[in-house]
Image (tube, coloured by chain):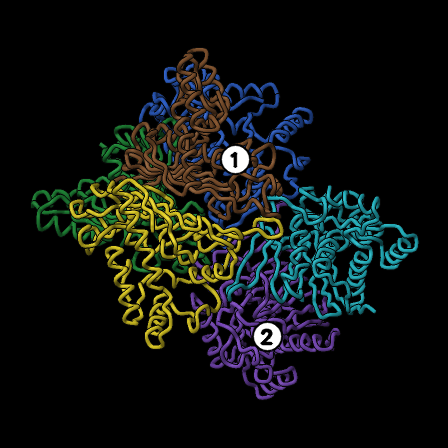
Chain colours: A brown, B yellow, C green, D blue, E purple, F cyan
Amino acid sequence: MCEKPMAINTAEARKMVDAAKANNKVLTIGYQNRFRPDSRYLKEECKNGELGEIYMAKARAIRRRAVPTWGVFLNEYEQGGGPLIDIGTHALDLTLWMMDNYKPKYAVGTTYHKLNNQKNTGNAWGDWDTEAFTVEDSAFGFIVMENGAAISLESSWALNTLDVREAKTTLCGTRGGADMVDGLRINTVDLNRQVTIIPDLKAGGVDFYAGSGDMSPGDLETSMWIDSILNDTQPLVLPEQAYVVSQILEAIYVSAKTGEAVYFK
Amino acid sequence: MCEKPMAINTAEARKMVDAAKANNKVLTIGYQNRFRPDSRYLKEECKNGELGEIYMAKARAIRRRAVPTWGVFLNEYEQGGGPLIDIGTHALDLTLWMMDNYKPKYAVGTTYHKLNNQKNTGNAWGDWDTEAFTVEDSAFGFIVMENGAAISLESSWALNTLDVREAKTTLCGTRGGADMVDGLRINTVDLNRQVTIIPDLKAGGVDFYAGSGDMSPGDLETSMWIDSILNDTQPLVLPEQAYVVSQILEAIYVSAKTGEAVYFK
Amino acid sequence: MCEKPMAINTAEARKMVDAAKANNKVLTIGYQNRFRPDSRYLKEECKNGELGEIYMAKARAIRRRAVPTWGVFLNEYEQGGGPLIDIGTHALDLTLWMMDNYKPKYAVGTTYHKLNNQKNTGNAWGDWDTEAFTVEDSAFGFIVMENGAAISLESSWALNTLDVREAKTTLCGTRGGADMVDGLRINTVDLNRQVTIIPDLKAGGVDFYAGSGDMSPGDLETSMWIDSILNDTQPLVLPEQAYVVSQILEAIYVSAKTGEAVYFK
Amino acid sequence: MCEKPMAINTAEARKMVDAAKANNKVLTIGYQNRFRPDSRYLKEECKNGELGEIYMAKARAIRRRAVPTWGVFLNEYEQGGGPLIDIGTHALDLTLWMMDNYKPKYAVGTTYHKLNNQKNTGNAWGDWDTEAFTVEDSAFGFIVMENGAAISLESSWALNTLDVREAKTTLCGTRGGADMVDGLRINTVDLNRQVTIIPDLKAGGVDFYAGSGDMSPGDLETSMWIDSILNDTQPLVLPEQAYVVSQILEAIYVSAKTGEAVYFK
Amino acid sequence: MCEKPMAINTAEARKMVDAAKANNKVLTIGYQNRFRPDSRYLKEECKNGELGEIYMAKARAIRRRAVPTWGVFLNEYEQGGGPLIDIGTHALDLTLWMMDNYKPKYAVGTTYHKLNNQKNTGNAWGDWDTEAFTVEDSAFGFIVMENGAAISLESSWALNTLDVREAKTTLCGTRGGADMVDGLRINTVDLNRQVTIIPDLKAGGVDFYAGSGDMSPGDLETSMWIDSILNDTQPLVLPEQAYVVSQILEAIYVSAKTGEAVYFK
Amino acid sequence: MCEKPMAINTAEARKMVDAAKANNKVLTIGYQNRFRPDSRYLKEECKNGELGEIYMAKARAIRRRAVPTWGVFLNEYEQGGGPLIDIGTHALDLTLWMMDNYKPKYAVGTTYHKLNNQKNTGNAWGDWDTEAFTVEDSAFGFIVMENGAAISLESSWALNTLDVREAKTTLCGTRGGADMVDGLRINTVDLNRQVTIIPDLKAGGVDFYAGSGDMSPGDLETSMWIDSILNDTQPLVLPEQAYVVSQILEAIYVSAKTGEAVYFK
C-alpha cells in the first residue's frame, strides 16, 4: 500500500504495477476518499446505473488560501509537483472510479506560479516561504476519454475564488447527475419533473462492502487492506486504476510545458 | 448591429469585419450581457486593476432543463449549433471582455447529443421534438491563451446538474477574483485576511458610461448604439472582439469532431 | 358538477349517485384540490406503487384564525356544518384518493364550539358574529378502514396552534411516505439510507392527463369536465368516491353527538 | 420508583397502586420527560390558566427509522409491546399531565407490523432481526375524555414520514395553544392580533419547584424522589396518573385487535 | 392639519398652538407614523402598562445613502434643516407618544456636514448637488426628561453604517421592552424566563380606534381628522405634543452650534 | 498592569499616571478587548485611513439579563459602580482607541436602578440579592469631543431589549464605517455603489504586531506586556488613554447625579 500519487512519473508507476503482477503481490494506493460515506453511496448509485452513461464530469480540488507550509510540499525537486499531485489526484481518482472509465484519449492543461511570490497572503497555515515555493500554486486540465466523455480537472492551493471544494466530483449522465455540494445531491427526472434526491449519509446502517458496517473511512480502508493481504481479495483501489491517474497528471504537466495537447497511445 | 454570434462561421465573420472597415461603417454585435449592472461594475473593477492579471476564468452557461422548443433553435442546418452558440457565446464574450484578452493559442472541446432523444424530460418549455433536435444539447471547451491564461467554457440546454448558471463568468487574478453567484462577489486579501466584497447593485446611482444613469441594460445598449451612429463613437462591443468569440466557438466544434486540439495561427 | 360536499347528508348523496346512474348522466363533485400540481404528481407516485401499501394517513385542514365571516358559512341550519364540511372534506377526499381506499370500517370524532363566542379574535376576516356562529369551530376524527389502514382527520377554522395546513395529506406506506410541507416531499430508503426526494413542481412540462399541459388547476378541472360531457369520459372525481367522503363526515358528526364509534355496514 | 409503563397490563398496575396505598408506601413511575425545562415551563403556564380549557391535544412519539435493536425491545412476549409502550407512553403521560385530565371515556386505535420484515432499512442502529421483531412497529390512537376533550396519539419506531417528534405534546385551549416544535412556542391572541410567545429555556434561573434551581432533568427527578421518601412529600408522578396511562395504552391494543372502540367504565 | 415639523422654530410653533386654542379650532400635525399597525399595537401595549415605566428609549431615523435630491430638501434657508427635521422628527414623535412623556429637562446634540461635498456617492436617488446641500447630513441628540428618562435620537440621510432603521423606536421599561426590528418584538420575563413576544400585524382584524377596522395608515389618519372636524373629537396628534417635538429639535440644533447643553425651563 | 478601570476615580488615576512617569515605570491597563482579532483588524483599517475621519461612534455593552451575582459586583461601596465601569469601560476604550481621539469636550449621562429590586428575573446567573444590588443596573451617556465628534455610550447588565451587544463599537467615518454585528462588517462606497466588506477573521495568518502570529488574545496581551517590561517597548494600552476613559465614566456618573452636562477643561 503506497501513498498517492503512486510514483514520481508514469514510467516508475508502470514498473510498480508490473512488479506486483510478476511477484504475485497485492498492491494498492492510498486514495482514501473512495472510502467516505458519500463516495461509497454514490459509487453504488453509479454501479446500479442510476446516472446512466456518464459523459461529463468535474474533478475539483480547489482551496482559496490553504498552502501547506510544512514538510517538502513546496519543493519541486523533492515533491515533483504541487496541488495537482497533492489534492487534484484525489479528485481525479474519485471521478474516474465513479465513471468506471480508464481509457483517456488526450489531455491538455495549464499550471500557474502566480501567487507563490506574494506576502501577507491570508494563508490558513501562515505565510509561505516565497523562495522555497517552486511547485505550481494551481493547475487545470481538460481530459477527453476514448468514448468521448470529458473531465474538467481543477486543483489549487491558492486561488482567488469563492467556489471552493476539495476532493469532490460532479457527474453528468444520461439518466441523472450527482453534485457534492452541501452533501451529496442526486438529480434526475421523474414523472416529467426535475427531481432532487437527498440521501441522509449520517444516519442508519451501512453495509456496502462486506463487514464495513459503520466503520470510519480510515478503519474501512485499513480493514479492507488487511483482508486483501490475508485472504488475497482484490483491493478497492487497483494499481491499474492508479496508474491511469498518474498518466493523466503527467500529461497535464507536459501539456502545460509544451503548450500542446498530449495524446495517449 | 447584428445578433450574436456574428456569423455562421469564422470566414463569414471575417468578411463582416473587413466590410465594415472598408466602408467605414460602424459594426457591433448584440452581446447584451455586457450591459448588465453586475457586468459593468465588474468591468470597471477589472479596468482599475483590482483583480490584477487574470490567468484563469470560467465562462458558464448551464441550464438543467431549458431547451428552447420554438423557432429553429434545434435545427442544425438552419441554426448552425445549439447551446454553444446560443448561450455559451454570451458567457465567453463576457469573460474575454473582462480579461481584455483576445489572443487565443489553442482550444479543445466536446459536444454531446445525449438527452435530445429523451421524452418526459421535465423541460421548462415542454418536451422537445426528438426528431428535430439535431444540434448538440451540451458543449464544453478549454481554451489556452497566448499569454498562458486558461478559460473553461461550459454550455448546455439540458444537463443533469444542480450547478446551474447562465451568462456568468468567474475570474481568478493575481490580486483578486470575481464570482457571479447570488450576485457579484469579489474576493481578495487585505491586511493578511481573506476578504469578501459585496457591492449593492440594486441601490444608488450608476454612471459608468457617460449618460447611462439608471438605464435598463436594454435601454443602455440601444442608446449607446444610437450614439455610435450619430456621433461616430466606438461601440462597446467591437467587431474584432466578437470575431474572436466566433473563432473559439468554431474551434470547439472542430475539436469535438476531430478529437484533436485546434491551434490558432 | 356539484359543489362539495355533495349533499346535506348521506341519504341525499345516495340519491344523487343513484339518479346519475339510472339516467346515464355524468356526475362529478368539485374537489378541486385533486387538480393541483402536487396532488397530481403524488397521485402518479401512488399509482406507480412508489409508496407501497399506504396504511396510515393524515388529512389536515387546520387554520389558526380564519373563520369565513361572509355568506352563511356560520349558520348550522343553512350550511349543515362548519370547517369539517367546508375544508376538512377536501383534505379527506385528497387522502382517500391517494390511498385509493374507499371502504371504511368505523369512525369516531369530536366537534367543538369553543372559540365561537369570543371577541377580538385576531380573525383573518375580522371578528365574527358570535350569535350567528352556530356551526362547530373545529372537528377531529379517526377513521379505520376495512383493510386496517387508519386516517387521522383534523379540521378547524380557528384553533390555537402553529401547525397550520390546509387541504394537505400525509401518507405513510410500506415503501415510502409523502408529506405536503414546504412543498411535496417524498421519503423512502435507498441503498440502506434514508432518502428525501424533492420534485420541482414549478418547472418543466406536465402531461399526466391527456391534454393537461401546463393548465392551471382550475382550467384543468373545467376542461376535463367538458371532456366528460362531450366524450363521455370518466370524470376524475367519481360520485361513488365523493359519497364515501360524505359518509365519513356524517359519521364523525354522529360520533361527536353520541360519544360512540359509528360502524359502517 | 418503577420504570414506565408501570406494569404489563392494567390489572397488574391496579395491584401496584392498591399495594402502595395499603402499605402507605410512596410509589412513582419514571416519566422523566415531565422534568425537562420545556415541560416544566409549559406545566406552569397550564396551571396558571394561560391556555384556558384544553380541549384538543396531540401526543407524539414518531421516529422515522430508529428501532432499538438491543435488549428485548422487539420481543412481544418479554416486552409486551413496541413503540406504544416504549415512547408513546411518555408522550401520552406528558399530555395528560398538562391537561390535568385523567378521565377517559373511550379509545380506539390501530397497531401495525408493516416494516418489521424489511431489510436494508436505513435504521439508526443498524438492521433489525426480522424474525425477532414481533412487537408492532407503529401504533396510533384517538382518545375521547369524559369532558369531551380529544387526544390524538401517534407512536412509531419506523414510519415513512418527515414529521418526526419524540415525547412532544401539542395543546389547543380556549385561551391559547402550545406547540413543541423548534423549542416551545405558545400562541394566543392579544389586542386582537395573533401572537406567538417564545420563552428562552436555556437562559436564566429556574425555580419552579422548591430547590430545583438549574438542575438537569435527571438530577431533579432524583432529588424530588429522595425528598418524597425522606419527607413523605407527594411525588411529581402520581401512581393514579400512571395507571390511567396504562389503561389507555391497553385500550388501544385491545381496539387494534378487536376493531372496535373500548369504553372505560 | 399641518405638515411636520409644525413650524420653522419654537416661537412660531407656540403661536400656532395658542392661535388654535384662542380660536377654538382643531389643530393637528401630520405625524403619520403613529397610524402604522405596529405603532398602534405598541401604543396599546404601553397604555396597558405592559412595559411598565419606560426609562430609556431610542428614536432612530438612519438611512445609509438616501438623500432626497428633489425639491428644496437640501436648502438650509428654505427648509430650515436636514434629516433631523425631515425624518428624525417622526422617530422622536413616535417615541415621546409611546412614553407619554412630554417634559424634557435638557438636551444636547451634534449635527454634521461630512458627506455632502462628496461625489459618486451611491445615493439611492442619484448624486446630490454638492453646492446646494447646505443642511446637515446627519444629526444626533441625547435628551433627559424631567422624570429622569433618557432618549437617544439618531437621524441621517447619509451615514456609513449598516444599522439602518427609519421611523423606529426602541423602548426599555421596568416590565418589558419593545424593539422595531424585523417587525415589532416585545421582550419581557415570564415564569423566571426571558420571553420574546411576536405579534402578527399582517393578519386579523384591527379595531384599536373606533371605526378604524383594516384601514391603511393614510386612510385612518384622514378619517380620524375628518371626524375631529365634524364631531370635534380630539385629534390623535395633539398640538401640545408636536410642540415638544419642535422644542427638542431646536434645542439639538442650538446645542450643536454652541457646544453646550440646552436646558428647558 | 492593572485591572480596568484603572482607579476608583479620576484623581486616583491621575496619581497612577504621574507616579509611573516619575519613576520611569511601564504602566498599562487590562483592556483586553483591544487584542481580539476583529479589534486588531479594525484598528489597522482605521490607521490606514480606510474609514476617513470618524465623527460618530457608538460604544455598546448591553446585556439583556446577565447581572454578575458573585463577588462584590453589586456593591456600590466596594465596587464603585455597576455595568458602566464593568463592561461599558471596555466598549468606550475600544471606541476611543479606534478613533484615536482622546480630547473630550463635554459629557452627559444617566444611570438607572430600575430592575435591581425585581425577583424571578430570568437572569443568566440566577436571581440577584435585591438588598445587595446598590450599583446602577444600566447607564447611558453622550460624549462630544473637542473636534466635534460624538460618542453614544450604552451599558447595562439588565435591560429589556433585544439589541444586545457587549464590548462592541460602531464607527461612522467620512470614507467608510464599521459595525461589529455578526462579525466585523466594513461599509463604504466604491464605483458609485454601496459596498459591504466582510473580512474572514477565523482563517489565515495574522501578523499585525511583531511576533503575534496566531496567538489568542490573552496570550498576545501577555506576551506584549512581557515585551514591554523586558525591552521597554510601549504597551498597547497607554495609561494616558486609560485615564481619559476614567475621566469620561466619572463625568457620566456626575452628570447623572446633577442632571447637568459636565465640561472637561
Q: Quadrant of the C terminus of chain C?
A: top left
Q: Quadrant of residue B108?
A: top left
Residue A227 x/y as whole percent: 45, 14
Kindly tell me whether residue D141 is visible in this rendering.
no
Q: Residue reaching furthest front? A: B265
Q: Are marks 2 and 1 on the same chain?
A: no
Secondary structure type for disc 1: helix
In the image, residue B83 above or below residue E106? above
Q: Residue reaching furthest right? A: F23
Total marks in image = 2
Residue that numbered label 2 is attached to = E117
In the image, residue D7 above or below residue A190? above
Q: Residues within 10 Å of mark 2 (few under 14, many from 20)?
A: some
| Type of the residue with mark 2 | Asn
Residue B113 is left or right of residue C63, and the answer is left
Residue E107 is left or right of residue A251, and the answer is right
Residue E252 is left or right of residue A18, and the answer is right
- Letter of the chain that mark 1 sits on in the rendering: D
Q: Residue reaching furthest left? A: C23
Q: Residues within 10 Å of mark 1 (few under 14, many from 20)?
A: some
Front in this rendered view, residue F136 or E139: E139
Q: Which of pointers 2 and 1 indicates the residue nearer the eye?
A: 2
| Type of the residue with mark 1 | Trp
Q: Quadrant of residue E46?
A: bottom right
Residue D244 x/y as whole percent: 48, 28
Residue that numbered label 1 is attached to = D97
- Letter of the chain that mark 2 sits on in the rendering: E
Residue A43 x/y as whole percent: 37, 29
Kindly tell me whether residue B134 is visible in this rendering.
yes
